[in-house]
Amino acid sequence: MVRFVIRRLLLAVTTLFAISVITFLLFFAVPSSPATVMCGKSCSPERIAQVEHRLGLDQPLIEQYTTYMKGIFVGRTIGSGDFVRECPAPCLGYSFRTDEPVTDILKRTVPVTLSIVLGAAVMWLTIGVSLGMTSALRRGTLFDRMAIGASLVGASLQVYFLGLVLLLVLVYGSAILPSPTYTPFTENPFKWALGLLLPWITLGFLNSALYARLSRAQMLETLSEDFVRTARAKGLPKRTVYTRHALRAAITPLITIAGLDIGASLGGTVITESIFGLQGLGRVAIQAVEDLNLPIVMATVLLAATFIVVANIVVDLTYAFIDPRVRLS
Amino acid sequence: MGALAASALSVALVASGCSKTTNDNGGGEAERGTQAGAISYDTNDNKAPAPAVTGAAKGGNLGVFLPDGFEHLDPQRAYVNVAQLADQLLVRNLNGYREDGKGNLKIIGDLADNPGTDVNKDCKVWEFKLRPGLKYEDGSPVTANDVAYGVARSFSPDLSEGPHYIQSWLADSSDYNKAYKGPYNGGAELPPGVTVPDAQTIRFTFAKPHCDMPYAATLTTTAPVPKAKDTKTEYDRHPFSSGPYKINKYAIGNSLTLVRNPNWDANTDPLRTAYPDTFTFTFTLQADQIAERLVADAPADQPFLSWVNVPAAQLQKTTTAGVKERVVNGPTQFVWYFNINNQRITDINVRKALNYALDKDAVLKAIGGTAAGTPATTLLSPTVAGYAKYDVFNAPATGDPAKVKEILGSTTPPALVLAYSNNPRRAAQAEAARKSLEASGFKVTTKPIDPTNYYTEVGRKDNPYDIYLGGWGSDWPDAGTVIPPLFDGRQITPTGNQNLSYFNNDAVNAEIDRIGTLPNAADRQKAWGDLDKKIMTDYVPLIPAYYDNNYTLTGSKVGNAFVSDAFGLPGLSNIFVKQ
């Protein structure tokens, strides 16, 4: 177990390192000059050189990379003379565009994305899995047909369509719900939930469709397995057979997918954030790419990668607890 | 750089001229003949307090929706018009614009008691006297030293994002850092050429005449900053208020809330009526959501206005009763040109033919039609002082292929490379342009360029393109910030050009020099207008495509919203919440 965790962690670090190098190289492979973008109107060659110097873009690539990585682990000093700034570890640099510390930008955007994704995940998992399981147990009934029919509709819709329709109907049209906003949970949990309700419903409905279909299929497959027949034959109550035996086995693959889904969504739900006007990680990342804002591009890419890597490890660990057949070694 | 150079700066950079602004219909604005800006030394004009707005009421919270936060609120670093407009509430500058929404624009003293004295009548020495009783948010007095300190810090390479006019004039070089790098790292307190004879007086001495100084002094470069309050790069988060409002809460990237500055005295301020009690800026919504919300006009959104144009997809919703009355519609300081590369297309007849061939109407329809702009025939925007309406070609806005054939005669139309910035709007426009040029017999190849790299590419003197779109907005409403940067051929360099048609003509260059030294503003304006027409009549370096337009919405409780000719967006200094 411990060896497994250590091995996975080492692999995770290597992955992240590789991603950081690739991002850095890709950024500079593009024939664009961030200094020109930041410099704005009436930009003379001298001024571009000045901006490049200030942003550290006049340094050799390897030095820029090592400075950046050093900043993450031990912090660094940015600027010179009266403009020296101490950037303590983990230092992700300053936004080229607004001079804001990147860690501050993450501090205000990560909670937004986290709230959207985790809230929506709770919604899609509870709705999706319970619908799917129930359908499987009542296979062929009207409930089954309706649930699976509805999930087909859900699986075919897109967030930019359903989200906009819900916004038009529930917010702009009838004003049943307030415009989506983000209020920190710590400030007002009720407002937090109310402001995010619409994205949760949208994402929850769309993704639950997939999970309903998946869990139905998994459950049906499990129910036809020998060990379930054995459990039934032993005379165990139906309830115990379904919840203690069948459910545990059926849910394992769902956890893999859910873990990866959540991990990937945390990296940025750009479309959802854009549609509902929430300033999360995804929108910041897209804006940064458009602006050639290297420190933010690096930070968001690394963070998104971290989410996925961590989600993978968590999924693997969870397996061991849920499915006794899996042994980590 | 064509002011829309970078996607990061896609909001217009600064100021300009003069528009009649309608608050009564959604259909575009009335024809404008000529535009006269005025630097007013009239003591009545320069008197504080600012004239009351008819029907205005005090109080309430006025909201502004804009899709991105401010890059820089620090007055010395602000260059984008949204930041400069927000700064009008927080800081006062030496001069400012008084606008009434009916097309009258006057430059008067803001901190200064008049728009600047030309001491020797040669535009080389300018003196500004501050009004008595000016105070900061902590009650301490505003002094001429603080104005000088603000100008000094604008020289710093670490705070260099703002306009560079005054710095370049003082140092007599666009590479002004050779002479001075700001008051930091042991640098002198005062920049070269700035003196402060007493606490109420500041004097600027230039090596060359700069008769535009009253305009340049409206820029937030001249906002006062007390040395003790200078937090350098941190100043962006909290500029020390000398204006009617101060920062209450600034969540960068999310929102900004301003509350009244109790130490601001209306009797010292000729520009701002400051009716609302608070202002709230919201940066999280995108243009289409802003449009939807303002169309819906829910009670909470009624005192809000937008600083971003209604996207093409939502335009139809703004034409219904109840909404169309709330459209703020008027030209901005920007003009879009199809630049013709004069180094490659040397035959003036071909350039004339191109002017007949282009379907300006289709180019506009590609981005939203009349809401996005109106077809242009002049080099100057209708908002710029000196603008005089003319049309050399009298071609229909949809183009005139017959006339093209007539001009070209037996000459074969050359094959053209049309370059464009590769985003959906510009791609649609390039396609419309290509179609219309081909309908006139030109063979056109289109060449997409990465948006972040577009102006760098077309700004290279040896670029391999024949025709490409470029926008330009004046920094203040005078032709002096349009014609010289775009048509003075002596400024052409190997890279980073603004003269994108690479037009270089000795007679025009000489005329630019002559106009720059005319001491009388009215003479200068007239001469710029004449030169505008002469360039398009005798040389035809480019195709004026369209005048950019502001088409934004307000909620039903916003009063006195009109497009500022100086900034190309609804200003906030005299706006109010209907009670």
Image: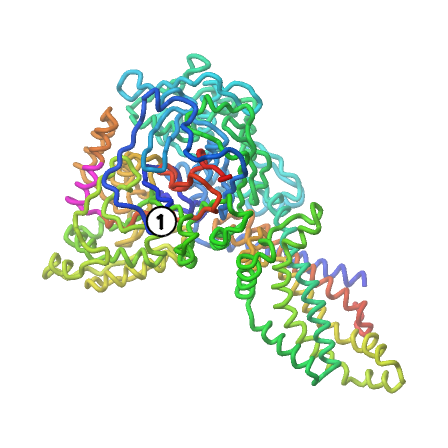
Front residue of B410/A19: it is B410
Q: Judge left or right: residue B463 versus residue A189.
A: left
Q: Is residue B570 above or below residue A298?
A: above
Pinpoint residue A103: horizontal percent, then vertical percent.
62, 44
Region of the chain picked out in magenta, as a range: B529-541
Pinpoint residue A109: horizontal percent, then vertical percent.
61, 49
Q: Is residue A201 above or below residue B29?
A: below
Q: Is residue A190 above or below residue A201?
A: above
Residue at (36% x, 56% y) in the render: B368
Q: Secondary structure at mark 1?
A: loop
Residue at (14% x, 53% y) in the render: B349
Check disc 1 and report the residue beneath it. Answer: B25
Judged by its main secondary structure, the magenta piece is: helix
Q: Is residue B161 visible?
A: no
Front residue of A11/B537: it is B537
Identify the amino acid type marked 1: Asn
Front residue of B533/A77: it is B533
Callout 1: chain? B
Pinpoint residue B377: horizontal percent, then vertical percent.
23, 48
Q: Is residue B492 visible?
A: yes
Can you say which quadrant of the picture contains the N terminus of chain B?
Answer: top left
Q: Is residue B485 magenta?
A: no
Query: Alpha-carbon neighbours of circle 1 within 10 Å: few (<14), some, or many (≥20)?
Result: some
